[in-house]
Structures are given as structure tokens and as C-alpha cells.
Amino acid sequence: MRIAHVAPVATTIPPPKSGSVEAMTSLLTEGLVRRGQDVTLFATGDSTTSATLHSIYPHGYWHDANMWPWELYEMLNMAAAVERAADFDVIHYEAAYYPISLAFTRLCRTPIVQTLHHSPTEAEVALWCHYPEAAFVAISREQERLLDGLNVVGTVLHGIDTDSFVFREKPDDYLLFLGRFTEGKGVLQAIEIAKRVEMKLILAAAEDDYYRERVAAHVDGRNIVYFGEADFDAKVKLYGGARALLYPIQAREPFGLVLAEAMACGTPVAALDRGAVREVVDHGVTGMIFDDLEHMTNDLRRVFNLDRRRVRDRAVERFGAARMVDEYLRAYARIVENRRDR
Amino acid sequence: MRIAHVAPVATTIPPPKSGSVEAMTSLLTEGLVRRGQDVTLFATGDSTTSATLHSIYPHGYWHDANMWPWELYEMLNMAAAVERAADFDVIHYEAAYYPISLAFTRLCRTPIVQTLHHSPTEAEVALWCHYPEAAFVAISREQERLLDGLNVVGTVLHGIDTDSFVFREKPDDYLLFLGRFTEGKGVLQAIEIAKRVEMKLILAAAEDDYYRERVAAHVDGRNIVYFGEADFDAKVKLYGGARALLYPIQAREPFGLVLAEAMACGTPVAALDRGAVREVVDHGVTGMIFDDLEHMTNDLRRVFNLDRRRVRDRAVERFGAARMVDEYLRAYARIVENRRDR
């Protein structure tokens, strides 16, 4: 199949450090190429891929204050794929911010499908519903529920590169919080739990205003330790050494990539029951899901007792790239067939 | 000619209060219809026009915090015109922020032309230069100079509705500053001049942080008077009563609508020689252009002595809608012909 894969143009594919959309885009592209698909990746010129790279920019706007307004750069990158529509059977747009490809849906014979990477508001969905023919892939059933009235052609949980998340059988003796410092991610709740169970907690995320204003006061360098922002290798080490990943998430998120990543290192997770958590965590196998902090605190030791080898195996099975690539290929086939029928 | 005129969708066409792009869009649309052109205006549903109105939104995003991100609303409004491209001989996009229509240039047989309403940066122009076929209308030679390398098919100074700017022969005894309170508009310089010549100065603009931090301390309610934001009727009265409009502009602006408006009321202008000022003001007829504040202060009384009837007549001749409509029709004809030749 001739596939145009349109990435965000903020930074390289794969990303230098953080960037979940970019990481997932790279993983899917490489997986499709390995299956013998003819993939053209629309991304910045400094990207690395085994697909054919089509770049209209040498680098991304995260690295160049002159690239403003960034929205226009995203639009023109999408347009570059649509301009070559006749070369492709399907155009797959990674809607990192919002589905600008809606503007092209009716201008293009080649079917366009977009993967959404955020939880849309009702007003967003109401707008998008004016394009009932536009195809969406949801990244969880949690997100799919929000897309009521839209043409959702598949729900595909993200994959991760499980080979590079190294399994570790014997962890050290700490808890881990990894993610952005925001209200929604629940870092203050993670700190509260660590204090209650009297265990060391490592916080790994980029320093920001929320950290300085709300988090820093709790950091004592002994029980509550601030690591900073972890690059990939550091992240894998931090996961592997943790007795458990704490995920007392407050917001309803459409996915939770850190859950899959921790699990791939053999580290079980302790998560609150919000958003897509139930779809990512197998309760009693790869972690435990709690209704509230009280239960999480009381039963945390049961999380430590989960079999780390089994955590890893289940993560590979459920979040390996293979499953994601299969499911996207099925979604593409479905869209192409629908288009042919019309 | 079948013309699609694509307006910004921030508010109504014409605008309820301020909004120079919206005012100019309305004026051009109504003028084209009066010439018997077949115009379809792509604008919000609460707009008022004698053209055919094509609305995909009931109202604009300035009035609805739910309409976010606004960029997508602008894009889809432009797309709505492109989806109907076969119905039009030309699509004219008012690029209030940036030319998103570039994304459609190669997807559409009908030629697209965009009027730019800001002074672009070098980085913006470098990006747009990747679309050498895309047609632009500049709003002044000052702006045109910045568009080096682009396909500028015409330079058309804005028009205003000169009938509604009432001529006043005998003014009161004050100076006027009208415009946003920003560094670039030169309000502090206007205050300095008024103090030096010991005349009353009225400031008319919406209150903002810059006003509170930098301007308010100078306002004494007698010599320096703050009027607030003027609606249309108040604006016309303020212009008509002024001995002169002070325009000690600091930024290089691509046009200066207040200059044309004041002149249409018979009020001469005292302007610094920056940006498009020389193209809008006829030195010695509709106002005087100065190199610096010193000269403006010393020669201000020569501005008062200009013949107000002549100021008005020249403004009607140069900035009446008729001239603008003529020039746009010529630009459209040129684009359509070029497209046919290719």
C-alpha cells in the first residue's frame, strides 16, 4: 500500500527527547516499512527514517523562533501530502493539536485518516461533525466516546518500542513519578502517598512554574528526590529501578504512555481509575487500579508483589509495535475499501 | 465575474466596532455588488451584505470562547470557498493574520488571491516564497517592498466609506490621537507634542495595560483628556472636531486607516515619515509629513492652516471605495487571464 504519513513538524521524527506523538509516528512508520509497505513520511529534513522522507522544512519550529506562526507550517506540511494525493492510497495525518486535515477532506480523492492525540472538547467535536465523512482513528475507547457523531474507523492503542525498554528483574527500593508537572498528572498526590508509606519517591520531569510553586517545597533530596527531565536512557534506568510507577492521575487522559513504558521494563504501576487507565493496565497483572488515594496507599505493597517478568511479557504482547502496525493496516484497508465503494 | 470573497470569521462583516480588515472587506464586497459582480461572501451568519452570504458559523470567535482553536475556524472557512471553486472565477482571501490560503493554492483550479493586512517578517516571506505561483495584493508600496520574490499582482490602497465620514468645516480647538495604545502607535509622542504646543489633546482608544502603565499618569482631564474607545459615530465626531490628527507613528506600518478617515472629515494630519505615511498623506494638501518630533512641534500651526475642504476632496478622490473597487477588479482580471494563459 502507498501510504503518506504526515507527522507534526515541531521537531525531528523520532524526537530528540520528549514527544509522544513523534515517537509513536516514528514507530508506526518503521513498522509499516518493515512490513513492506511503501511509506512516505512528511516530516522535517533532520528526521531519521527508513521510509521515503518528504521535507519542506530543514528543521522544526521547536528549534527556531523564526518559524512563526507555527500553525501555518503544520498546514503547509499537510498540504504537501495532499498536493501529491495521486501518489498515495491513503494519507494518514497525526493530529498533534487539532485535525487541520478536515480542511482538505473534500478536496482530495485519496482518503485521509487522522489520529487524534488529545481529548477534544464538546465544541471541537461539534465543529468536526460538519465533516461526517472525515475518518478518525481514536487512541483509546475513552477518547472514542468523546468522538460521538464522527466517522471513527478504528481504535488503536499506542505501541512502544519494547526492545529498547530493557527488562529489569530486581528493582531498587523507590517509587517513581514520571510525567509533566501539572495538576492533572497528580504529582502532589504521588508525594502524599510516598510520605504515607514512608518510601523514597523520585520525580522525573522538566522544571516549570508548577514545580517551583507547588512541588519544590516537598523535595528534600532524601525521601522526595528531584531528578530533572530524563532523556531516553535515563528514563529506562529510572523505570527499571522502581518498585512501582505511581500514576495518581487527576485528569481524564486519552492514553498513558508512561504506563506502557514502565510495564515494558517489568515495573508494575499503581494507578487511579481515570480516563484510559483501565484500557492500558491489566488489573492484577501489570499493575493495580484504585478508586482513591486511600486504597492506593493501603494496598501499594500488593503492587510490589506482582511478577515483574509477567508484567513485561504482557506489556510486550499488548503494546509492542507489531500489534499497532497490524491494527493501522486494517484501518487503512477499511478506509480504502469504503472510498472505493462510494 | 463570479467572485468568492473570504472574510475573517472573528466577528461580523461589517464589524460592530473596531476591525479594519472587516470594514474594508465589507466596503469592497458592497462596491463589487454595486458594479453588478456576482459576489459570494464567506463570513459569519450574523453578517450583513447584499452579496450572497455563505456561512458555516452562526457567529465569530471574538464572541465565543468555545470557538477554539480559532485557526481551524479560519481554515475551514477558506476551505468552504475552495470546495466550491468551480462556482467562481476567482477566490479572494483576506489574510487578516497570515495567508493560510497558500495551503490550497495547488489544490484548486480557480485562481486564489490574498490581500495581506500586516507587515510580514523576513522569515514569513521566505516561507511563502515556496509558493511562487500564489497571487498577493499588497496594501501599499511600503508593504509590497517586503514581499520580494512573491507574485504581487497589484498594490491597492484601502478605501473607506467616505459618505459616512461627515465633513466638518469649523473644528473645535483640540488635537486628536486615535488608535491602539502601543509603543508603535506613538501615543507618548503625541502627548509630548500637545504639552509643548500647549493645546488640548484627546486620546481615543480602548483601555489596556499600556494605557494604565504608561499613559494614564499624563491624563489630567483638562489638557490631556481620555475619551475611551470610540464607536463609529463618536469617532466621526472626534475627527471632525479636531484641528489636526496627530500621527507620530513609531512602527513601520503597511497602511494607516485613521489618516484616511480623519482626512475624509476634513481634518488634516500631522504625521511622522514612517512606513506607508507618504503614500497616504499628500504633503501640503491633506497634511504634513515630518522627519522628527521637533519639526512637527514647530510647524504644527501650518497643518492647521491647510484648507479643510480641499483635505476632504482629496480624501474622497484617493480613498473613496470607487477607486479601490476599480483596482481590485483590474487585479482579478489580471489573475484570471494569467491562469488562462498557463
Image (spheres, coloured by chain):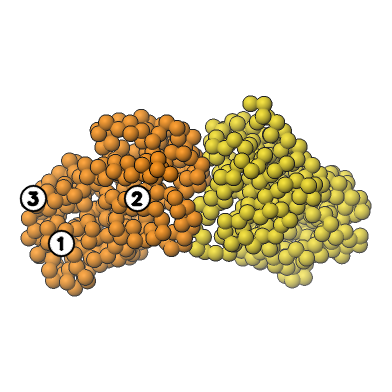
Chain colours: A orange, B yellow
Q: Which residue is mark 1?
A: A283
- Camera sees residue B332: yes
- Does dot 3 land on a helix, a strand or a loop? helix
Q: Seen in the image, is A231 located left or right of residue B94?
A: left
- Please name the residue shown 63% across and 48% down the image: B6
**Nearest-to-viewer mark from 3 and 1:** 1
Residue B242, by quadrant, is bottom right
Q: Which residue is mark 3?
A: A309
**Nearest-to-viewer mark from 3 and 2:** 2
- Does dot 1 land on a helix, a strand or a loop? loop
Residue A59, by quadrant, is top left
- Camera sees residue B213: no
Q: Earlier in the sequence, mark 2 or mark 1?
A: 2
Quadrant (top left, top right, bottom left, bottom right) of the C terminus of chain A: top left
Q: Nearer the viewer, residue A227 or B117?
A: B117
Q: Residue furthest top?
A: B342
| Disc 3 to disc 1: CB gap under 8 Å | no
Residue A243, by quadrant, is bottom left
Label 1 CA crowd tier, 10 Å (few <14, some 14–19, many 20+): some
User: Mark 2 belongs to which amino acid?
Assistant: Val
User: Mark 3 belongs to which amino acid?
Assistant: Arg
The residues bearing labels 3 and 2 have C-alpha atoms spaced at a distance of 34 Å
